[in-house]
C-alpha cells in the first residue's frame, strides 16, 4: 500500500488495508488461509462436496478429492465465489478452488468425519498439520 500517495480515494486505501497480501507464488500457509476463507465464502458448495463425499463413503468406496473438485466445477449447484487477495507487487488476484488444494480438502473432510475413507497423500501441507487443523476447525 502506498501511504504517500495522497491522490488515492479513501475507499481505495480502506480496501487495501482490508485485503490480505500474499506472496506469489503462494506458499503453503497462504493456501491454508485462502482455503479457509474460500470455505467461509462458499458454504453451500462446501456442504455439497461434503454430502457427495459422504454418499461415496457410504457406498464403501474411497473418496477422491480431485473428483469432488471437478464435480463441483462442472456439475455443482452452487455458484462459486472466488476470494480476492493482493500479491506483494500490489496486483489483485482471485483464489478459487483448484487441484492444488486437494490435500486441504481431504484434511477438511477428515476433521469433519474422521471415519471417512479418504487418502491423504504427501503434500506441501504436511509440515502444517496442526495449523491446518486449527484453521479448518474455525471454518466449521
Image (cartoon, grey):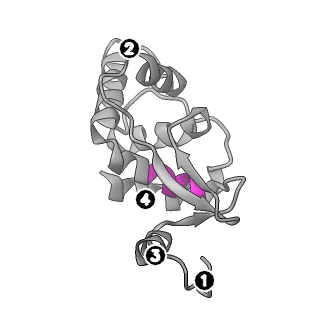
Residue with the mark numbered 4: 135
Question: Most prominent secondary structure in the magenta stretch?
Answer: helix
**Mark toward the start of the polypeptide (4 vs 3):** 3
Residues at badges 3 and 2 in contact (C-beta under 8 Å)? no
In the displayed structure image, the side of residue 31 where residue 82 appears, left or right: left
Q: Residues within 10 Å of mark 4 (few under 14, many from 20)?
A: some
Q: Is residue 128 visible?
A: no
Q: Residues within 10 Å of mark 1 (few under 14, many from 20)?
A: few
Residue 41: x percent and y percent? 34, 48
Q: Nearer the viewer, mark 4 or mark 3?
A: 3
Residue with the mark numbered 3: 9
Residues at badges 1 and 2 in contact (C-beta under 8 Å)? no
Which residue does the image show at 50% across and 40% down from the upper left?
96
Residue with the mark numbered 1: 5
**Mark toward the start of the polypeptide (1 vs 4):** 1
Q: Residues within 10 Å of mark 2 (few under 14, many from 20)?
A: few
In the displayed structure image, the side of residue 46 where residue 133 appears, left or right: right
**Residue in the foreground of this view, choosing between 39 and 19:** 19
User: Secondary structure under badge 1?
Assistant: loop
Residue 124: x percent and y percent? 68, 48
Task: Relative to 113, say whether 57 is above or below.
Answer: above
Task: Relative to 58, say whether 4 is above or below.
Answer: below
Q: Nearer the viewer, mark 3 or mark 2?
A: 3
User: Secondary structure under badge 3?
Assistant: loop
Residue at mark 4 to residue at mark 3: CA–CA distance? 34 Å
Q: Nearer the viewer, mark 4 or mark 2?
A: 4
Task: Relative to 99, say whether 52 is above or below.
Answer: above
Residue with the mark numbered 2: 60
Q: Residues within 10 Å of mark 3 (few under 14, many from 20)?
A: few
Which residue does the image show at 48% across and 42% down from the upper left?
107
User: Secondary structure under badge 2?
Assistant: loop
**Residue in the foreground of this view, choosing between 64 and 89:** 89
Amino acid at each position: 500500500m502506498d501511504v504517500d500517495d495522497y491522490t488515492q480515494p479513501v475507499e481505495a486505501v480502506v480496501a487495501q488495508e482490508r485485503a490480505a497480501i500474499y506472496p506469489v507464488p503462494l506458499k503453503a500457509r497462504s493456501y491454508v488461509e485462502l482455503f479457509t476463507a474460500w470455505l467461509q465464502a462458499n458454504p453451500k458448495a462446501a456442504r455439497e462436496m461434503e454430502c457427495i463425499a459422504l454418499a461415496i463413503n457410504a457406498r464403501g468406496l474411497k473418496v477422491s478429492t480431485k473428483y469432488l473438485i471437478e464435480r463441483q466445477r462442472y456439475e455443482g449447484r452452487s455458484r462459486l465465489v472466488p476470494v480476492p487477495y493482493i500479491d506483494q507487487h500490489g496486483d489483485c488476484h482471485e483464489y478459487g478452488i483448484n487441484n492444488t488444494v486437494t490435500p486441504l480438502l481431504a484434511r477438511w473432510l477428515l476433521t469433519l468425519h474422521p471415519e471417512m475413507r479418504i487418502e491423504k497423500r504427501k503434500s506441501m501441507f504436511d509440515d502444517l498439520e496442526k495449523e491446518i487443523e486449527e484453521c479448518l476447525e474455525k471454518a466449521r
